[in-house]
Image: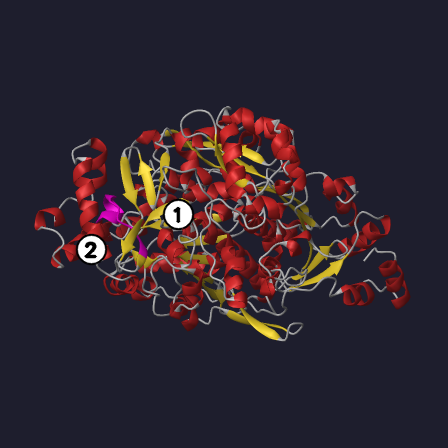
Amino acid sequence: MPNDLPLKDVKICDFMWVMAGPASTRILADYGATVVRIESPTRVDTARTLQPYHGNQLGPDSSGLFANCNAGKFGISLDLGNPAARAVVHDLVRWADVLTESFSPKAMRAWGFDYESLRKVNPGVIMLSSCLMGQTGPLAKVAGFGNMAAAISGFTNLTGWPDRPPSGVFGAYTDYVAPRFTAVAILAALDHRRRTGQGQYIDQSQAECAIHFLGPAILDYTVNGRVEERSGNSDAAFAPHGVYPAAGDDNWVAIVCRDDDDWRRLCAAMENDDLARDSRYASAAGRLGHRDAIDSSIAAWSRKFDRTALQFRLQSHGVPAHQVQNSADAYADPQFAHRKHFVALDHPTLGKFTVEGPRAKLSRTPAKVRRAAPSLGQDNQHVLESILGYDETQISELVASGAIG
Amino acid sequence: MSMLSPYRVLDLTTERGLLCGQMLADLGADVIKVEPVGGSPARSIGPFYKDAPHPDRSLYWWAYNRNKRAITLDLERDAGRELLRRLVERADFLIESHNPGHLAKHNLGFADLAKINPALIYVSITPFGQDGPKASYADSDLIVMAAGGPLILAGDADRPPMRLSIPQAYLHASADAAVAALAAHHERVRSGLGQYVDVAAVQSVAMATQSNILAAALGSVEPRRMSGGVKMGPIEIPLVWPAKDGFVAMTFLFGSALGIFTAKLMHFICEQGFCDEETRDKDWIAYGEQLFSGAEPLSEFDRVKQVVRNFTRSRTKAELLELAVERGFLITPVTTVEEVVESPQFASRDYFQNVAHPELGESFRYPGPFAKFSATPIEYRRRPPTVGEHNSEIYRKELGLSEREIAEITRAGII
């Protein structure tokens, strides 16, 4: 199949693992980059062990998280600690434009695969290291997952009810933020290299890039000295602004009034003249001051209706509203379907495997998910033979050494 | 030379898409914020410097417009649109976040502008995308989070699902848009052609479900919200744990990758006298499967969690973080904004950057470069622009308008 994708000429040697790293190279693979993902034959990628599972069964290839983060890549299993792996890594680095890794800071150095060593092999290479706290500093050694970076960069504390302990943002939040910064950094560095021939090293702290998603709260502290705290579903400027019950068990509708017009439309949708006429509620300031009373009125009304019917009714009045969707709702959602958000790929052992499609639509050269994520070592032969040009003897020696497995 | 210094970006975004242009500006692009006369609606979003609303003192504006220049231009008027077209002739990217069809109605859609500049990359950021059944839905951060999947996963089980208190949806979309713009640019270097990029925030926020948006499609169990953790089927998994003086995030999970860490932690907890050896020596790799199969009763898991809680509660956040550094435990403190800004880690990396605001006679600490580039470090060249700050510079020097012409269009309210 001809590759006419935007990044068809970009070659990435990808040592990243778990979520934040692989999610970034997944984006680049969708845009056409050739990504060779290196996995350890012995130390399993944590992402392979995490939910959701294909068929609700844990298996080596059944993690939807792994499948989603690694679709479109080639996979090889290479034991980086094995001396025979060294030459393979060097050959991959010679082949690559970009080298990415997301181990804890000391790992690549311990193997001799730090930037200073690898630039001798390929002076133009762009190497990006991504880890929780960055390559330097007293906490550089803190390894782990995005839920931990979310806590130490302020997200966890800012999700919850004011009268209760932090509920916490869902999962490994910085792992959802960092990949875009990673991909942008790589693409900008590639453009710079195209113009100047200069490669470079990029030290990405997942916490540091994610903090930009808290920018206004950070400035509220550095400028005004105010420490923002979690505020449930309340908004500083909008009221009502909340998640209200709908008929049935654990069914919810989010409703927001951005301005006085939205409020009048909401009252009309509720057919509630008393609310509409109440002068205390005519302005945002008034509604913010009577937030709880308004929320109770809305909840008493909303709980009588089906959530989808509420969404249609409110949106037809022009009120920002949406049912609160779980994955089943999203899978059945006509807008997600229209955007082709769910893409079913052929998987070598599991039949069809659905992953998320590209999130941005390019009109002339749209991104494409070209294949399912690789099984462990699935592409050893292809990568060694076709990409690195090894002959059968070299390959069997590597296998015999235990470096490839 | 910085990475994107040869390129010019026209940033027509409303309050929705500001981060996209800022990412490109941080990387060195010449980003010109094009605002309505009087300033962008984003300038009315708080908090404000000293809590006094003022278009040049919105901290929301400050957070996402660094390194940009700014002009005002009334696109509702023919003369304003004509000036924009002249800017488009020399632009490499245009970013906008109006409701679908809004700019096309003003003859400023992609098809219109591609005729002037076929190499233009035109990026649109909207809540639901340019078309489809929900394209014209009324929106806000909370609405997009509800539709896109993250909302239902967070919150306390006995209360409604909940968002992060700082709006996030359009930041996810803006960051995706920046990636897409540069991918399109990479292709343009070969083909000489621009294209249209359509980003839907509802898809971008699905990223914040940790791939659980796929649960139904894969036939997997739906995670359920739970305070400080998540429920998978009947199993309650805490992710936030109590410390002596607050809370910590701790990865206490199982399986072939994570069970190793849990085993290491349980050895320490046992050493410290919080549990017996039998509890310590459970099969932490197989433990998750034992819970799902029922081989390990949930009541026993509850007891184990109590043991772990007794341990975490006996230590301060700082003590637990020290253990994470020394012993590789998967623990970090749940941190306030103040603690983030004052953190020795960020200080040691010179992360927070002083940005001078001469108009206020003060400097403020901003979140620093999103990554450290060895050859082309990100520089904070300009503080966020005041309303129309660069009108003269751009209209006079770059478009070649005379002082009299500028005075005329200013009087006419075009700029």
> What secondary structure is marked by label 1?
helix
For the record, the magenta segment spans B247-259
Q: Chain of mark 1?
A: A
The stretch drawn in magenta includes residue B253: yes
Front residue of this view, candidates B96 and A288: A288
Residue at image mark 2: B311
Q: Is residue A118 left or right of residue B282?
A: right
The stretch drawn in magenta includes residue A354: no
What amino acid does circle 1 point to? Val
Q: Chain of mark 2?
A: B
- Real-space CA distance between mark 1 and mark 2, rounded to the nearest whole angstrom: 48 Å
Residue at image mark 1: A383
Front residue of this view, candidates B390 and B387: B387
Q: Position of residue A303 (x, y in %)?
A: 48, 27
Q: Position of residue A292 (x, y in %)?
A: 50, 41
Q: Is residue B118 visible?
A: yes
Q: Is residue B321 left or right of residue A162?
A: left
Q: Is residue A77 left or right of residue B15?
A: left
Same subunit under labels 1 and 2? no
Q: Position of residue B2 (x, y in %)?
A: 60, 67
